[in-house]
Image: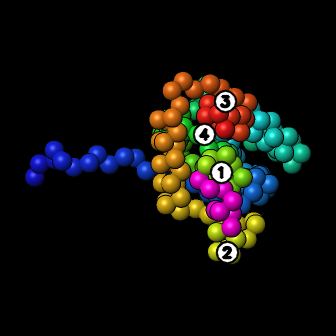
């Protein structure tokens, strides 16, 4: 009857596809993105440079590669991918929500177990667990529990970082903003 005590349901983020290694993520992304018009978003300049080199080598110059900052969401065409996770929840959630509003297709976020965000979650133990579960190198893991765990870690990092400083890579971001 009354809704005073009901928790406001937050908008669900799409499940994140997690690959065992960055190489596997890039192989899958390039193979999938060349199938139809695609837009790939990235957070760090290092990732953008790596992806541009791979797309050029694959002859896939028609794929749009956009930095998340200042990207015109109206430029989106076809499949939409976010090629890495941002350490803080705010920028990541804002990007995903903006893409979902402006895109007629689903948004797919990708990451890998070598990423610093997974290192914070016990990277080597996660790799061992994934190996024990029999996940092959070219397969990915995607589940709402993984997405929720990443979201929880991002929220904890939000609390630790008082004044965010920019970096050229996610690894540098962790070193500069958290002293890791």
Locate residue 73: give its quadrant.
top right
Asked whether the residues under the numbered discs 3 and 2 touch, taking CB atoms below 8 Å apart as contact, a structural biologist would say no
* Label 2 element class: helix
Q: Residue furthest right?
A: 57
Residue shown at 53%/62% (left/top)? 143
Instruction: Estimate how packed mark 4 is, as few (under 14), some (14 to 19) or many (20 or more) residues with alpha carbons within 10 Å.
Output: some
Residue shown at 51%/27% (left/top)? 162
Q: Quadrant of the C terminus?
A: top right
Going from the N terminus, do you reach mark 3 or mark 2 first? 2
Going from the N terminus, do you reach mark 3 or mark 1 first? 1
* Label 1 element class: helix
Of 171 and 22, nearer the camera is 171
Asked whether the residues under the numbered discs 3 and 1 touch, taking CB atoms below 8 Å apart as contact, a structural biologist would say no
Point out the stretch of residues depicted in magenta: 121-128
Q: CA distance from mark 3 to mark 1?
A: 16 Å
Q: Which residue is mark 4?
A: 86
Instruction: Estimate how packed mark 2 is, as few (under 14), some (14 to 19) or many (20 or more) residues with alpha carbons within 10 Å.
Output: few
Q: Which residue is mark 3?
A: 176
Q: CA distance from mark 3 to mark 4?
A: 14 Å
Q: CA distance from mark 2 to mark 4?
A: 28 Å
* Label 3 element class: helix
Residue shown at 26%/48% (left/top)? 7
Going from the N terminus, do you reach mark 3 or mark 4 first? 4
Asked whether the residues under the numbered discs 2 and 4 touch, taking CB atoms below 8 Å apart as contact, a structural biologist would say no
Q: Which residue is mark 2?
A: 132
The residue mark sitting in front, 2 or 4, is: 2
Residue 79 visible in the displayed image: no
Going from the N terminus, do you reach mark 2 or mark 4 first? 4
Q: CA distance from mark 1 to mark 2?
A: 18 Å
Q: Which residue is mark 1?
A: 119
């Amino acid at each position: 009857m009354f809704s005073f005590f009901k928790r406001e349901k937050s908008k669900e983020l799409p499940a994140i596809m997690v690959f065992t290694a960055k190489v596997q993520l890039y192989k899958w992304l390039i193979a999938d993105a060349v199938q139809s018009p695609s837009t790939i978003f990235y957070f760090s300049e290092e990732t953008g440079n790596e992806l541009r080199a791979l797309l050029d080598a694959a002859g896939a110059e028609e794929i749009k590669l956009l930095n998340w900052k200042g990207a015109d969401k109206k430029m989106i065409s076809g499949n939409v991918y976010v090629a890495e996770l941002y350490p803080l929840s705010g920028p990541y959630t804002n990007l995903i929500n903006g893409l979902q509003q402006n895109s007629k297709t689903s948004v797919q976020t990708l990451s890998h177990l070598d990423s610093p965000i997974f290192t914070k979650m016990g990277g080597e133990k996660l790799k061992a667990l994934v190996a024990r579960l029999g996940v092959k190198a070219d397969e990915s893991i995607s589940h709402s529990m993984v997405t929720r765990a990443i979201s929880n870690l991002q929220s904890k990092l939000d609390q630790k970082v008082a004044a965010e400083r920019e970096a050229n890579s996610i690894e540098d971001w962790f070193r500069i903003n958290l002293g890791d």
